[in-house]
Image (cartoon, rainbow, N blue to C red):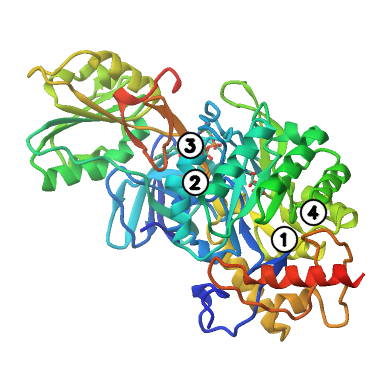
Amino acid sequence: MIVYKKASILENTPVGENIFHLSLEFSGWALPGQFYLLKLPFQEPLLARPFSVFELGERSIEFLYQVKGVGTNLLSTMVKREILTLTGPLGNGWPLPEPEKKLALIGGGIGLASLNMLTREINSKNNSKVDLYLGFSKKPFMLESFSKITHRIVVSSEEKNEPFLQGKITEFINPADYDAIYACGPRPMFKALRSMIKNEGNKYNKPIDLLVSLEEKMACGLGSCWGCVVKVKGEYKRVCHDGPVFNAWEVDWDEYS
Amino acid sequence: MDRYLMPGKLTGMSTVSLEVRIGDLFLKNPLIAASGTYGPDSFELIPPSLFGAVCTKAVTLNPVEGNKPPRLFEVKGGLINRIGLQNPGVNQFIGDIYPRYCQYDTPVIINVAGFAVNEYLKVLKILEENIKDSVIYELNISCPNVEKGGMAIAQHLPSLKRLLTKAREITNKPLWVKLPPQGDLNKLLKVSEETLVEAVVIANTYRALVIDKETGEIYIGGLSGPAIKHLTLNLVNQARQLTPLPIIGCGGVGDLESLMQYLKLGARAVQLGTSLFSNPDTPSTIISELTNFLNTKNLNSLHDYLHPPGSFKVIDKREKGVGNLQLGSQKSIKGRVFNARNIIRVKEIKSDEDS
Ligand SMILES: Cc1cc2nc3c(=O)[nH]c(=O)nc-3n(C[C@H](O)[C@H](O)[C@H](O)COP(=O)(O)OP(=O)(O)OC[C@H]3O[C@@H](n4cnc5c(N)ncnc54)[C@H](O)[C@@H]3O)c2cc1C
Ligand SMILES: Cc1cc2nc3c(=O)[nH]c(=O)nc-3n(C[C@H](O)[C@H](O)[C@H](O)COP(=O)(O)O)c2cc1C
Ligand code: FES
């Protein structure tokens, strides 16, 4: 059930350069990869902003966000006990992989927010084998949190950041090792992945599934305004309702540039 | 308590009628969900039962792909959208979308759009043949972000006249016209009066320009939200002086104050769109605040507040849809059948005979 509910800030702290960890007092639910709209208690910005659920506790919900523009700037100045309004959970979320499948999860920058619950969920319930790849342009963040839920992490940074690998994360993946790749991050990362995987099967000569979580500006977040569309199989689909997770081989990437 | 008159949230409060009359039909409250901002996928969070009526997204004859993204730009005080009428066409609307509205009692307004007069008319015919419920048609001649049709029809009065005249021949159901905010209001209203539409919706979004910060691209779309409220209030005020047709105000309604401002200027009801995005609780908040307000004034109905006994004003025009303002006629109409329609038709005919 989708709710629209107030939540008070428990914690809103920087965890990296322009990256904040926001924790709210909230009893809610969400599947991995789903998101909530967060509305600030001010007239501007007028619209709520979408954020993936990073973690869900019994009485709390957590988000990770990068400061980008008006909304996230304001959000970063908010303190404990201030109130936000949440709408959600929204969107389809990541499908759990079939058991025994070998899976790579790839998070580019703040895109890792959408993979935390999924990693934990797969490791605790599902016996597929999952490797996590996290790529950062600058200093890596939130690794401690991920290291609690998986030991199979590859981390890279485009800047020199010992002890991490240096370069784009896509340089360190061998797609042929996997049955499926789930990715969330900036558009150039999707492009790199597609060109690496395209037309190639994995080492068992099976096609590799590539699922991506896409971002678009939103108004309703519910599927009614048709503002947040991407072209999928020749038709405009709503990121908030039909996505945000889409089969990358069905997305019209020439449109989504 | 009458479930139809009061949203569930208000159970326990004293019953106040928020009913309004538009032409010859009654709505249980003056809030209408505006076209394109609300639909079946909103029902779970914002139930149709909160509204006096709900309007569908624009329906066209053939499927429309819509504009290439980006489609949304938030600007100071508002939202510029350029959706481009994306919809699956009238047949799929009838098969897949309309049935989702039928599970609720709330009256449905079907927003009809097209790229030429004949397209609007074909859509109406198909709807008439397939939908037997009492729906309301809202002719959208004011979409600012498609190249043909939409606002172009409003700018060519002979086309508009042909559209409205023929539409009236096709259907007996209430026909509303959603006018553009830009254009000769007086002429648009005269054509609407002459062609016997039941009500005018004033107005749609305002054609506006935005420069994408990231790419420098220029986009044209429709501006909605708080930024347009005072512009549209002005149009409603002008229209009130120009026409006896019932007016539905639409632009920037987001709280009780804005509703009351529109009603004060003579609108019979309002539509709200953008405020459903910024706060999905808007309709339930307005309804409960309005109910409280009337309670504190010891009034039993919104009607008594708007037309206190003694201030009865007759708008004496004989066209259809312009009946006498009826004092104290609190018909609570349940379900999808607007019994009031017949009652008032009879009255209108009577007053014709009288003269
Ligand atoms: C399903 C989904 C999940 C998301 N999850 C996260 C998350 O977990 N953490 C996080 O930091 N960000 C996430 N985003 C992106 C986040 O919503 C935007 O960064 C945010 O809305 C920017 O708001 P702003 O007011 O700061 O920026 P604005 O001032 O509105 O714009 C600043 C810049 O951000 C871009 N932008 C604005 N809205 C969006 C948007 N909805 N998606 C992408 N870019 C946008 C603009 O084009 C512009 O370049 C997610 C987006 C979607 C669609
Ligand atoms: C995303 C979006 C889509 C819209 N689609 C339609 C439409 O299909 N048909 C129509 O007549 N108006 C459409 N409108 C206009 C609204 O119905 C309404 O007239 C306008 O938004 C002004 O009201 P508001 O300020 O309360 O939003 C749309 C508005 C928005 C924001
Ligand atoms: S934000 Fe309205 S349809 Fe996605």
| The furthest residue to the front | B353
Which residue is identified by label 4?
A: B233
Name the spot of residue A27 as percent of width and height, x first: 34, 62
Horizontal placement of B307 versus A233: left or right? right
Which residue position holds label 2?
A224
Category of crowding for the residue at label 2, using alpha-carbon neighbours closer than 10 angstroms: few (below 14), some (14–19), many (at least 20)? many
- Dot 1: few (<14), some (14–19), or many (≥20) neighbours within 10 Å? some
Image quadrant in which the C terminus of chain A is located: top left
Mark 4 vs mark 2: in front = 2
Q: Comparing marks 3 and 2, which lies closer to the viewer?
A: 3
Q: Label 3's element? A: loop
Residue at label 1?
B258
Q: Which residue is mark 3?
A: B88
Q: Percent x, y for residue B76?
A: 67, 42
Amino acid type assigned to the residue bearing label 1 in the image: Ser
Circle 2 marks a residue in which chain? A
Are the residues flagged by discs 3 and 4 in contact, CB closer than 8 Å? no
> Where in the image, quadrant-wise, is ligand 2 located?
top right
Give the image location of residue B52, x and y in percent.
61, 65
Q: Is residue A155 left or right of residue A217?
A: left
**What whole-number distance in Å separates the C-alpha atoms at marks 4 and 1?**
9 Å
Q: Is the CB atom of the residue marked by disc 2 within 8 angstroms of ligand 3's nearest atom?
A: yes
* Distance of label 3 from label 1 (alpha carbons): 34 Å
Quick check: marks 4 and 2 in contact, CB under 8 Å? no
